[in-house]
Image (cartoon, rainbow, N blue to C red):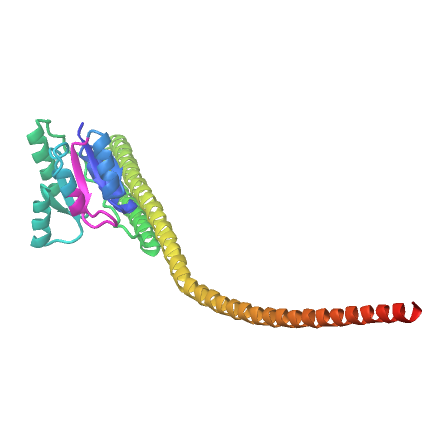
């Protein structure tokens, strides 16, 4: 079985595309970015790559060129998937080494043609035809649209049941009229035929209703999965928006903090200069006081010596 690597940053797109690939008999690996795709190709055996053209980080063109220009991975065919059509894009894809371009979501005949060419080149036998896949809802699911589709499907089921009931009543009425007209020929054969026809009609109605109900359940399950994928993608976008807002708030707050810090630094410098001036004045006053005290101490010492001399002179 061929293994395909599906590269797309959208969960909803990966879900829809992977179902189409699996319906074609492929084993599917997934990657959410060009960088992750290169890591998977380096570690896992991949037979074909379906590369989204527009992705954050390494885009589809750059990732395709990285695969086709590496001699270890150049043998892997790459199909570029895009929502934009144009000769310029096809030229860029060809120059990067892609074997073709598919629009998203791809038509089944386009996908079959690409896979048939790949299987022919690789010698792999073609895959038998598969049932028509359920139409996928595009990425960016709107809840109101989804609920409207669900209600539309339920209305279709109710209408189908009513049509079956009307058809059954019409057939029963017709058989009753036939039975009345044929009553002269004998009621027993007509009753037997009517019972057989009733059984066949009832079986057909039950079978058709079971098929319709099964198809509706499949479509509802697909819609439910797509809604969940859309909600996951919305949560991721909300988280990225929250981070962007936080970064923007930080960009606006940091300059304000820097200005406040600069003002505080200027005030601190002025306070330091004022304190230094006051300390210098105090030191000058202390020095003057010390000189005054020394002078007074010398005078006191002289007076004391004179007093001692006078006392010795008069007492002696």
Percent across and percent down for residue 271 are 55, 69
State left or right for residue 157 relative to residue 315: left
Residue 213 in magenta stretch: no
Residue 53 in magenta stretch: yes
Q: What stretch is highlighted in magenta?
A: 46-64
Q: Say how many tags the image has.
A: 0
Image height of 237 relative to 293, above or below: above
Image height of 89 relative to 296, above or below: above
Percent across and percent down for residue 237 are 34, 53
Query: Foreground residue, 148 or 59?
Result: 59
Query: Foreground residue, 237 or 154?
Result: 237
State left or right for residue 46 relative to residue 306: left
Q: Can residue 273 be seen in this view?
A: yes
Query: Foreground residue, 254 or 187?
Result: 254
Q: Residue at x 24, y 32 (%)?
A: 193
Q: Residue furthest front?
A: 316
- Split into 4 quadrants, where in the image is the N terminus? top left
């Amino acid at each position: 079985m061929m293994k395909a690597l599906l590269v797309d940053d959208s969960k909803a797109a990966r879900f829809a595309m992977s179902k189409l690939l699996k319906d074609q008999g492929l084993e599917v690996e997934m990657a959410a970015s060009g960088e992750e795709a290169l890591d998977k190709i380096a570690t896992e055996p991949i037979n074909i790559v379906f590369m989204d053209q527009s992705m954050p980080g390494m885009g589809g063109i750059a990732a395709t060129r990285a695969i086709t220009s590496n001699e270890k991975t150049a043998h892997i065919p790459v199909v570029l998937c895009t929502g934009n059509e144009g000769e310029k894009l096809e030229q860029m894809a060809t120059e990067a080494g892609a074997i073709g371009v598919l629009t998203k979501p791809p038509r089944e005949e386009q996908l079959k043609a690409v896979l048939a060419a790949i299987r022919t080149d690789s010698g792999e036998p073609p895959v038998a035809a598969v049932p028509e896949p359920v139409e996928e809802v595009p990425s960016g699911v709107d809840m109101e649209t989804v609920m409207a589709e669900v209600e539309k499907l339920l209305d279709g089921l109710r209408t189908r049941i009513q049509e079956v009931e009307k058809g059954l009543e019409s057939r029963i009425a017709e058989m009753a009229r036939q039975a009345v007209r044929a009553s002269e020929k004998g009621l027993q054969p007509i009753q037997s035929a009517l019972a057989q026809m009733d059984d066949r009609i009832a079986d057909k109605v039950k079978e058709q209703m079971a098929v319709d109900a099964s198809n509706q359940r499949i479509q509802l399950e697909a819609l439910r999965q797509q809604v969940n994928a859309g909600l996951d993608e919305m949560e991721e976008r909300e988280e990225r928006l929250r981070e962007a807002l936080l970064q923007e708030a930080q960009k606006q707050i940091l300059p304000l903090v820097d200005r406040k810090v600069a003002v505080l630094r200027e005030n601190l410098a002025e306070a330091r200069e004022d304190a230094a001036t006051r300390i210098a004045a105090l030191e000058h006053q202390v020095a003057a006081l010390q000189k005054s005290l020394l002078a007074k101490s010398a005078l006191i010492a002289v007076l004391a010596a004179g007093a001692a001399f006078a006392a010795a002179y008069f007492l002696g």
